[in-house]
Amino acid sequence: MLTQEIALTATPTQTATLSALMTEPEATVSDAPLYTPEAAGLLLALLLLSPKEPKEPRGK
Amino acid sequence: MSSHSAFAAASDALAACVLGALDGTGGAVQLARYVDDASDTLAALAAVRVLGADTFSPHLLLEGPLPAQDAAVVAKAFDAFPASGASEEAVVARRDHATAVLFARLSGEDTLRVAEPAPVDDAGPAGPAGWAGWCVRMAQLAPLATLVLDGPVHEAARDGALQLCRGVSRSILRRDFPTAVRLVRWLAWLHHEGVGLPLDPGLVAEHVLLVGGAGPRTALDLAIARHLLERRPGKGVKAAHA
């Protein structure tokens, strides 16, 4: 069997890589939605600048 | 390809094998064949070390035998990457020790010679890092959340059930699903031990399965958690110190 014939030894860098893979930290940048107060002003501006609602057709 | 990405890819491939064995879609894990067939043998051996105790999860949860040639591969992985004894790598040392304990149990021979790690920073959730930092460390120790193993880390988990639930909620809110799934494993283990939890582990497991089960290693963690949840609490094999 191949795995018994070849003696493999990792370099210190590879061992450090292994340790890093075994101790994965939590994600540093979170993807959570954040409260942004400026967005409220933007939404208000869009609301004010938006065209008027179409009226119900009268008659008929 | 850097060694980091090669090792990570090999770990993902092995995790997919173990996952197949665990959910019954891929037949038994054949570690010897996996390492023989790999183009980069060192990366394959690194994958065995990275998954560590999780490599044995089909044998533990489904109670299958560990063939001699697979046991030889695990010993080979420990030869290629000597077990760390440095105190700053307490997490790695704990994981290696857990692998060695399960290996000794399944193969019947204690040949890995991994020293029991010194209880350096088992400060529990009240330690200097606070519950959030403690939960990150517990997430790194998630492979210990399985049957058979019991030790100081498990004792800390029993004491910190509330903090672990907080940690799960925090990770889900941060959308850090790999960490959340690792902590769900601890909740599943606590549930299996019969510890009362303020958070329903079944619902959390289902939620993270729906929103963020990316990657074979995360999928494997989730599969192990679900196996633990489905087992009747208290039923299981005798515990060993790890």
Image (tube, coloured by chain):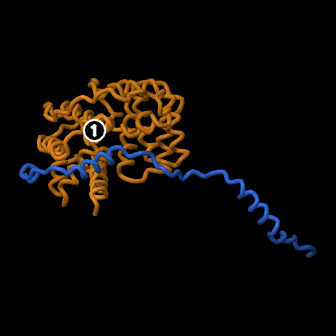
Chain colours: A blue, B orange
Label 1 Cα neighbours within 10 Å, binned few <14 / some 14-19 / many ≥20: many
Question: In this view, which residue lies farthest toward the bottom?
Answer: A60
Give the residue type at disc 1.
Ala
Image location (x, y in percent) of residue B236: 31, 27
Q: Position of residue B161 (x, y in %)?
A: 47, 28
The picture quadrant where one finds residue B10 is bottom left
Question: Where's residue B182, x and y in %?
Answer: 41, 41
Foreground residue, B217 or A6? A6
Between B142 and A14, the residue placed more toward the observer is A14
Q: Nearer the viewer, residue B12 or A26?
A: A26
Query: At 15% across and 34% down in the image, what residue appears?
Result: B107
Q: Secondary structure at mark 1?
A: helix
**Quadrant position of the C terminus of chain B in the picture:** top left
Is residue B62 among the parts visible in the rendering?
Answer: no
Residue B128 is at least partly visible in this image: yes
* Quadrant housing the N terminus of chain B: bottom left
Left or right: residue A3 compared with residue B210: left
Quadrant of residue B121 within the rendered picture: top left
Q: Which residue is located at x 22 percent, y 37 percent?
A: B64
The residue under label 1 is B53
In the foreground, B19 or B127: B127
